[in-house]
Image (tube, rainbow, N blue to C red):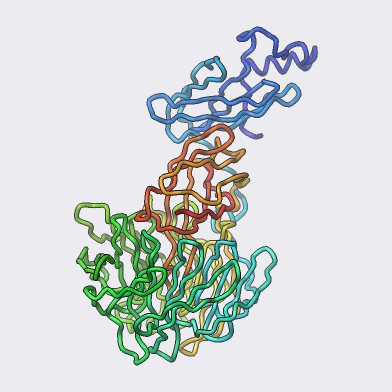
Amino acid sequence: MPGVRLAPRLLAASLVCGTIGCQDTLKPSLPGGALASVSVVYVCGNDFDLQSLTPAALTARYAVAGTSEQGELLLPPRSESTPSATRLTTLHRGTLRVSYRDEEVTPVSNAGTVCPPESMQEPQATSGEWTAPFDWPVVAVHLHLLPSGQVLSWGRFGQPQIWDPPTGEFTAAVSASMLFCSGHAFLSDGRLLVTGGHISEDHGLPDANVFDPATRAWTAVAPMSRGRWYPTSTTLPDGQVLTLAGRDEDGAEVDIPEVWTGSQWRPLAGAGRELPYYPRAFVSPNGLVFYAGELPQTSYLDPRGSGLWTAVATSNYGRRDYGSAVMYRPGEVLIVGGSDPPSQAPTSTAEVIDLGQAAPAWRYTGSMAHRRRHLNATLLPDGRVLATGGTSASGFSDPAGGVHAAEVWDPRTGDWTTWASNRVTRVYHSTTLLLPDGRILHSGSGDGVGLPRELNAEIFSPPYLFRGARPVITGAPDAVGYGQQFVVTTPDAGRIVRAALIRLASVTHAFDQNQRFLELSLTRVSGGLGLTAPANGNLAPPGHYMLYVVNGAGVPSLARIIQLD
Ligand SMILES: [Cu+2]
């Protein structure tokens, strides 16, 4: 284990072991204090090593002086004469106090030494790596991550397809309705509600269908009052689903939102408003639905009763036609790219708003290196936002301006960093989602405006997958309740500095109608992590989320998919 230095006392013990044998010097019957069983060594940053010479595993307690941080760490037994070493990365900087059984270890101060950068010769460790394109049986205009970890997609032609990442196999999931140009969101039980569909350009079906991942079957439920082509569906805090906008069977704009109660549609007759296609809508921590664009006049919709709109703030750039949007923390939304009007080149700019402020206002954050329209904004396990695909050219969707570089936005700095480029030009009808293994699936483009039909997909491995061993989750509950404290077991607990839930993706037309990111409070408990689920459905609508833990090097675990209700 590089970087581990033995405490002088343990080193002495080891030397003794080497000459006269360990049985005598390390006998547990030695009077306590004659030889410390546990010692602490400061390494660098907030890293300490806890070394144990006990013959059995031992739970140590620790606290960081001057902070509220405290926890437990399971220390493995020694191996032969060698002490076990367990790395602890404290969440705060301060002197580390450790105790075990009735013993107090001499406190060790945090010297504040900067850890040397890990040597990373591989270019992938700074810019990531794309796979070659591989076949996909439909143009993945609509792309969803199912609670099983499989991926459901469909386009204009052919039947919906389920892709199984471990085997690479596809299975058709035949639908009676033409689901192209629908809206969609996951229900609290993991089924996918799909709203509307395709009759012809600008003419939508009133159909509502539910896909059950367990049976891989579609069930038609009560239709909406009017057809919807290009609507957005949003799962509400109580598990009902709001559907906004779109055009009906006659090509007329549908101004009255409807809410799926689980058995019927409830119109919000008091909230009539014409909105552009696929509104960028999010549940806000206050329980209202926040409309973040594409129009610059952003507002809240109260979905209770007959519905009510209230203005929030006006964004700065103007209309972000086919820009993307993502709620990257509860109440904090990023809007990025798009163009106004489409005859103009798209913008590289991005704006953020914090709905938790007393008077929320949009402000510019950093701009991407590339102008983009028809891009996708995708949350990563570490809380950053990845931009993929789109076109930098003016016009509706000119493939000549195809942007291939991935770019990542860090909410802590507001800066974008350019990562590796994919091969296939993906513009109108491109889609992107985060897989449970931390890689990014990027697909679609075509099935419209004379574009090539891209019957393929590519997968991106971000730099965090090239930065050392991944932490491992060995146990997690399948379901947790709001505000519930729960334990995730992991041998890497001491090195985990973040835990997050990311809601399963349901993507189309440059927007994921389902994803959101929730950082969880974290403590170390013996053999694992103590986490607390989000407090309520306003923060995290009920349903399935990927749970990731991330270590101090920024490396995420494989996700466990858990149900929150
Ligand atoms: Cu379309």
Viewer-proximal residue, 101 or 563? 563
| Rendered-image quadrant of the N terminus | top right
Q: Give the answer, above or below, for where 191 lies relative to 392.
A: above
How many numbered marks, from 0 up?
0
Q: Quadrant of residue 287?
A: bottom left
Q: Is residue 557 above or below residue 51?
A: below
Instruction: Establish if 431 lies above or below 532.
Output: below
In this view, the residue in front, 100 or 40, is 100
- Which quarter of the image is occupied by the C terminus? bottom left
Residue 510 placed where, x, y %?
A: 43, 73
Give how far across and how far down residue 272 sits, in percent.
23, 77
Tell me where residue 553 appears, x and y as whole percent: 53, 44
Which image quadrant is residue 168 in?
bottom right
Q: Is residue 422 visible?
A: yes
Seen from the viewer's position, the closer of residues 190 and 300 is 190
Q: Position of residue 498 (x, y in %)?
A: 48, 44
Q: Identify the residue shown where x is 36% and y is 59%.
A: 237
Please report the residue visible at 64 percent of the width from the left and 67 percent of the height from the top. 164
* Residue 391 appears in the picture as rendered: no
Q: Is residue 71 left or right of residue 22?
A: left
Ligand 1 sits in which quadrant? Answer: bottom left
Residue at screen point 65% across, 75% down: 171
- The extreme front residue here reads 263
Q: Is residue 444 above or below residue 464?
A: below
Residue at the far right in the pictured view: 20
Name the residue: 31% across, 60% down.
Answer: 352
